[in-house]
Amino acid sequence: MLTTDVANQTSLAIDRSRDSLAEAITNRHYELQPELEQRYGPAGRAKCLQDANFHLSYLSEAVKAKLPSLFGDYVAWAKVMLESRRVPAQDLVRNLEVIRDTLRDRLPDEASQVTNEYIDWGIARLSETPGGVPSQIQGDTPLAQLARHYLDSLLRKDSRIDTILLGCTHYALIEGMLRHWVPFQIGLVSQGAIVADKLTDYLRRHPDIEERLDRAGRETFLSTEYSPRIERLATQFFGRPVKIDAVRLAV
């Protein structure tokens, strides 16, 4: 059984060397798959380094919380996000294996045993995760044509545009379609991962909040306007089946 001391020491070991670990992971991955350089170019390598940092950050938090399922849920989300960038799930699996092997070589034995278990849990979670988030704007429908019109208008504004920020949480529902339309050299930044990373950083800097959290809690999803459509949308956002119970508020 994972003790709190070992969990905290493992998390701290990852955090202290996260940048150098991410660099080593990226180098190792590209050494094992040199074709990635040609497939994705310099921008792809930079994104691989960024993703390695994200993976390590979420792994550290999951270990600290002693919740392998937390890392499993993150990996499931990462699969959907990367596939929207046209990065196949097998590349994510290979990257997780490289992370596992790199941590095994660089962390103390006790810590690497913990990270092995959590990463293997995450890899197993991938097989249970749907391949992508279905878009709510399909094919040649009027709404799809309108979205494409707005995107084309934006890109015509300035040929120097190199990044597009999706500033609303609901853009996640059409992010896959937008990534197919946006030229590969233009980055598409979704706020979900940024907000999650900032929240992780905030909680790390305010341990008093974490100390008040109840680790034995359970999830309950309630809605005052229940319908199958709301349940379907919630499932898309969470990347796993969500059951919503209807609630009526007294007036």
Image (cartoon, rainbow, N blue to C red):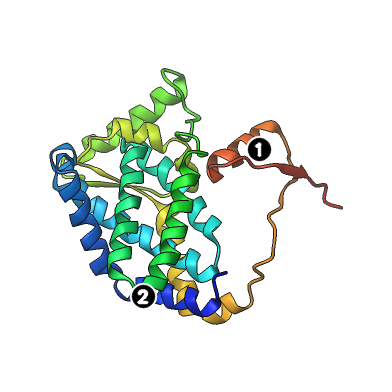
Residue closer to the observer: 208 or 7? 7
x, y (%) of residue 84? 37, 37
* Residue at image location 60% in from the left, 42% down from the top: 234
Q: Nearer the viewer, residue 20 or 238?
A: 20
Q: Identify the residue at image location x=31%, y=31%.
A: 180
Which of the 4 image quarters holds residue 150? Answer: top left
- 206 vs 158, left or right, is right
**According to the image, label 2 marks what residue?**
13
Q: State the residue at coordinates (48%, 57%).
A: 71
| SS class, disc 2 | helix
What is the count of numbered marks? Answer: 2
Please tell me in which quadrant of the rendered image residue 107 appears: bottom left
User: Which residue matches tag 1?
Assistant: 231
Q: Quadrant of the N terminus?
A: bottom right
Amino acid type of the residue tagged 2 in the rendering: Ala
Rendered location of residue 110, percent (x, y): 42, 72
Any part of residue 195 in sight: no
Which sits earlier in the primary sequence, circle 1 or circle 2? 2
Q: Residue at x 21, y 46 (%)?
A: 44
Q: How many angstroms separate mark 1 from mark 2 (CA)?
A: 40 Å
Amino acid carrying mark 1 in the image: Glu
